[in-house]
Amino acid sequence: MKALYEYFREGLGADVSDATRTAVELTEFQEDAVRKARRILAQYDGVMIADSVGLGKTWIGKRLLEDYAYHLRQKALVICPASLRAMWQGELRSATIAAEMISQEEMGRPEFDIGSCTDVDVVLIDESHNFRNHRTQRYQNLELMLSANGRRGRDGSRKKLILLTATPINNNVFDLYSQINLFTSGDRSYFAGAGIGDVYRYFLAARRASTDYQTTVELFNLLEEVVVRRTRPFIREAYPDATIAGKKVRWPERRLRTINYDLEQAYQGIYQDIVTWIESLRLAHYGLEEYKLDEAKRDEFELGRQMALVGIFKTRFLKRLESSIEAFRISIRRALEFVKTFDAYLSDGRLLDSTSFRESMRYLGSDGEDDAALPTSRADGLEAIEEARAVLDELPTLDITQYDLRALRTALTGDIDALTEIWYRIRDIRPEQDTKLRKLKQMLSGELRGKKVLVFTYYRDTARYLGRQLIDETGAAFRASTGSPNMRRIDGGTSPADRVRVIQAFAPKANNREDIAGTADEIDVLISTDVLAEGQNLQDAGIMLNYDLPWNPTRMVQRAGRIDRLRSEHDLLWIYNMFPDEGLEQLLGIVQRLSLKIETIDQAGFLDASILGETVHPRSFNTLRRIREEDDTVIEEQESFAELASSEALLRQLQQQWTSGQAREWLENLPDGIHSGLYRDAARGAFFYFAAPLGDGGGRQHFWRYYDLQTGQVLDNRLLIANLIQCQPDTPRFTGEGQADIFDVQERIIQDIVKSSQERRAMEAAPKRIDPVQQTLITTLRGYLNNPDLSRRELQQLMRFLGNPLPGVYVGTLRGAYQVFVAARDIHTLVEAMREVQAGVGAVEQLPVISSQAIDREKLHLICFDYVWS
């Protein structure tokens, strides 16, 4: 407790804001998050609020915006998914906070103009995990906006960034790196003052050391600097008396429920044949590298990417097959028409570049919300082919003489035959023969009759199919037989205004529309794609149904978060999942084999996020089986996989002691230098806690070290150390006298601290690490310093500019400009490109690294030490 008190005491109850007005009322655990976030923002350019889903990150973000936009009158910008724009507008209006609003979809457009936003002072990004891929257009546009004007806003201060996300990590720890990189501006030494000399290498080491692909314990010391993360179980235990608007917070219990249907019967007994045909597909038009005549000329990197792409498309076929007959039928039709078109071009002597898959995915059927239903009439089908041809005519072609055309034509013909066979076997399957649809109808007219139900599907095609069969004129008879519930469908094609109306009508209480509750306008059953999987308040409902298999269990948790939110009035929430009782294991087995192959290629370094998209992680297959068995522990377990290591539990423990006057006095009176000890299985060592003054500005530097007597190693990860020394009031005390030479251990610890301090200072003083292309450009410019057609002074200024870390989007621009220079040797064009980059960035200055102080042994003050013994 002494160690916790001394470590946290500067922040206990501290609040860097001296504002007197607030229109944002928060509960106790949200106030604690705001206090920590304010301390982080006082030190760094950004903070991430990563509380679990449904714990009120929006309100925390509003309070932080209030600090800047209301009290400081700074220019604020909110960037959120388009589906959350109306919600944010209402929230800000209720708190009289002025802020501009941009949707993430807008930022993803190449023509997006950042001009009006380059002078913002504070940017809040809701669902910031959508910026986990630095190669996307939206990420690059955001980088341009943040880095403009030397990263300074309208009032001259450095821009502040507030990130809100419940799932900071979706694939691996580099999802988190990309988001944090938004406020480090590409400076890998940004956290040097915190002992992290190169943040990129820090993440690399964490990924290598992780036993699980989402483990973040190795990142703890960095997370402590910039992240606020609390889980639902932690909040429930640490704040048992939390209230909102005078009402005690309720924490509903969550239960899984499996609904079985016959997949084999849904496909009229041909399911096994369909799966065999899908497995046989070569998809050669996406794997052209394999068909090169000269194996020595094959690009191994491109070959690996193409092999993975083929596996990804097969996986998507199988996932859509399970989703609905209609979604699968549309995918097969698109694929068949496309491969026929590709083959026709080859017959005309044109071999299309396989990287054109990004364009062709529109016709093959993408794996996301942007799926659009393919018209079923022959005329419309021909129109689609003509549209595809118009796009394909513009695509680059390859040298046809370098490829084995016979093998390629054979593969294409085999795919056409297989896809044609599938198409003719499934095209006439009628909705009344669809056992999955029939099972859903039985549920809605049976045990779910009269209840408010939220139905999720991953595919727009499936959502629209359900809409036609349950809601539109076709479904009139069904609705009449179930008591005429009010049912609606929503997807990415729904207009923003209609989307808001539907959300309010489905959850009027949660969205402050009590006037709709209980009226004929209130919606009872809502069918939606994942356009509603983030940020929406739908807790009027107590039942969520996943129509597709939850291939990504994290997505299931995100969806559940729509109904499991603060202010829910339900004691029990049900999460229904539809599972095929026949054919499931075969389906899982095939997808698992494909996924493992893709994972192997990914680990070899041949893939990037733009290729992978939504893949199935190998760990998910066992989880799927547990979901089918209605293992309720899966939900919290999946939340924990997305966890970020956090000290919040330790801080809360101390805060609870702090509120007791007697405990507070006892803690303040504990003398420095005291020691104790405890027994811990399989551990033998000593913990030392030293502090040192933090320069003229006051404050202290804290040094936690654990010396492992068995290995001789010194550990500085504060989370791992805290787990070693934590104890309860009744934990037996171990004095440790005579068990180790404690003075020798102390000397080793001091030497480690002094050495680490020296290394840290050296890292801060070292030249900034820059991208290799910048160094290449500096060298190139140096060779033109005496060129009479160029200004020597300008070239020197550009060289100094290039010697600073730059955001990735500008590095990419410079890399492209250098490649053009290598081909054309036009130095004037290259210099002009550098001028444009310099103008976009503005005046480059060193980022405000929190500089550490030089530490020598005389400055170190012993706070306490502990024996840890087995």
Image (spheres, rainbow, N blue to C red):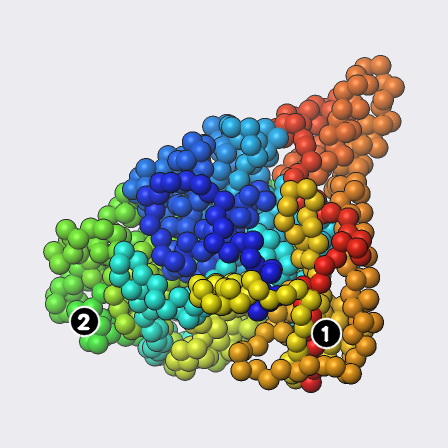
Q: Would residue 106 be found to the left or right of residue 174 on screen? A: left
Which sits in the foreground, 304 or 655? 655
Q: Quadrant of residue 597?
A: bottom right
Which sits in the foreground, 392 or 158? 158
Is residue 730 visible in the rendered structure shown here?
Answer: yes
For the point 78% across and 23% down, which residue is it?
A: 795
Amino acid type at circle 1 is Ala
For the point 82% across and 66% down, which residue is it?
A: 747
Give me the disc on residue 686.
Answer: 1
The furthest residue to the top:
788
Q: Would residue 784 be found to the left or right of residue 292 on screen? A: right
Amino acid type at circle 2 is Arg
> Quick check: 768 above or below 605?
above
Bin the neighbour count of mark 2 within 10 Å (Cα to Cα): few under 14, some 14-19, many 20 and up.
some
> Quick check: 385 above or below 683?
above
- Quadrant (top left/top right/bottom left/bottom right) for the N terminus: bottom right
Which sits in the foreground, 846 or 442? 846
Query: Label 1, label 2: how many angstroms apart (C-alpha)?
Result: 62 Å
Q: Position of residue 684 (x, y in %)?
A: 73, 80
For the point 59% across and 74% down, which residue is it?
A: 726
Bin the neighbour count of mark 1 within 10 Å (Cα to Cα): few under 14, some 14-19, many 20 and up.
many
Which sits in the foreground, 516 or 184? 184
In front of the other: label 1 or label 2? 1
Q: Position of residue 185 (x, y in %)?
A: 63, 41
Disc 2 designates what residue? Answer: 449
Q: Position of residue 398 (x, y in %)?
A: 67, 45
Is residue 464 visible in the rendered structure shown here?
Answer: no
- Quadrant (top left/top right/bottom left/bottom right) for the C terminus: bottom right
Labels 1 & 2 near each other (Cβ < 8 A): no
Q: Quadrant of residue 867?
A: bottom right
